[in-house]
């Protein structure tokens, strides 16, 4: 049981800030907000934000706002209203408008 618990813990820790399969290979930029770190990756007009850091009982609305702000800060683009999908660990947005080839 002890070995199983250690393997689960190692798996969870190694997954922190790792992209989903769709974003593997895309470079990430990290942003810190409210004591948490967000890794932002952009692929075309889609943006993925991965949260890392421990927050007991995180508020999904607050985390989604921080994810959106991180995505806009890193990409320099506005995100479409209502385009958020995901949860408190991984969020995805659609870019509303900007030149996605020009990243700051």
Image: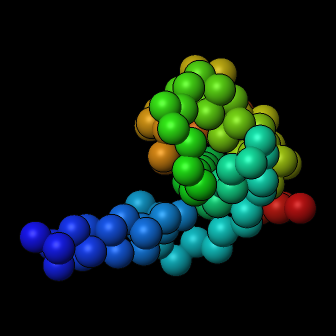
Query: How many numbered badges does the structure rendering display?
Result: 0
In terms of depth relative to the viewer, which is nearer, 1 or 67? 1
Q: Is residue 44 visible?
A: no
Say if 41 sits above or below 13 in the image.
above
Q: How far across and down, in percent of the image, does residue 3 sit?
A: 17, 78
Q: How far across and down, in percent of the image, does residue 5 sit?
A: 22, 68
**Image side of residue 21 versus residue 72, left or right:** left
In terms of depth relative to the viewer, which is nearer, 22 or 90? 90
Say if 83 sits above or below 22 in the image.
above
The quadrant where residue 62 appears: top right
Say if 30 sits above or below 97 in the image.
below
Quarter of the image for the C terminus: give it.
bottom right
Single out the residue that lies furthest toward the left: 1
Q: Residue at the location (62% across, 33% down)?
A: 63
**Image side of residue 48 versus residue 30, left or right:** left
Q: How far across and down, in percent of the image, does residue 12 sit?
A: 36, 65
**Image side of residue 19 versus residue 78, left or right:** left
In terms of depth relative to the viewer, which is nearer, 104 or 69? 69
Q: Is residue 90 visible?
A: yes
The quadrant where residue 53 appears: bottom right
Quarter of the image for the N terminus: give it.
bottom left
In terms of depth relative to the viewer, which is nearer, 98 or 60? 60
Q: How far across and down, in percent of the image, does residue 56 sit?
A: 51, 38
Single out the residue that lies furthest toward the right: 104
Q: Residue at the location (66% across, 68% down)?
A: 28
Single out the residue that lies furthest toward the front: 2
Q: Residue at the location (78% across, 53% down)?
A: 32
Q: Residue at the location (55% across, 50% down)?
A: 54
């Amino acid at each position: 049981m002890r070995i199983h618990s250690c393997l689960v813990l190692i798996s969870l820790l190694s997954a922190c800030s790792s992209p989903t399969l769709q974003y593997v290979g895309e470079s990430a930029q990290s942003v810190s907000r409210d004591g948490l770190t967000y890794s932002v990756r952009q692929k075309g007009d889609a943006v993925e934000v991965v949260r890392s850091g421990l927050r007991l009982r995180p508020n999904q609305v607050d985390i989604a706002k921080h994810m959106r702000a991180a995505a806009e800060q890193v990409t320099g683009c506005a995100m479409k209203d209502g385009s958020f999908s995901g949860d408190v660990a991984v969020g995805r947005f659609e870019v509303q408008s900007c030149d996605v080839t020009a990243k700051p």
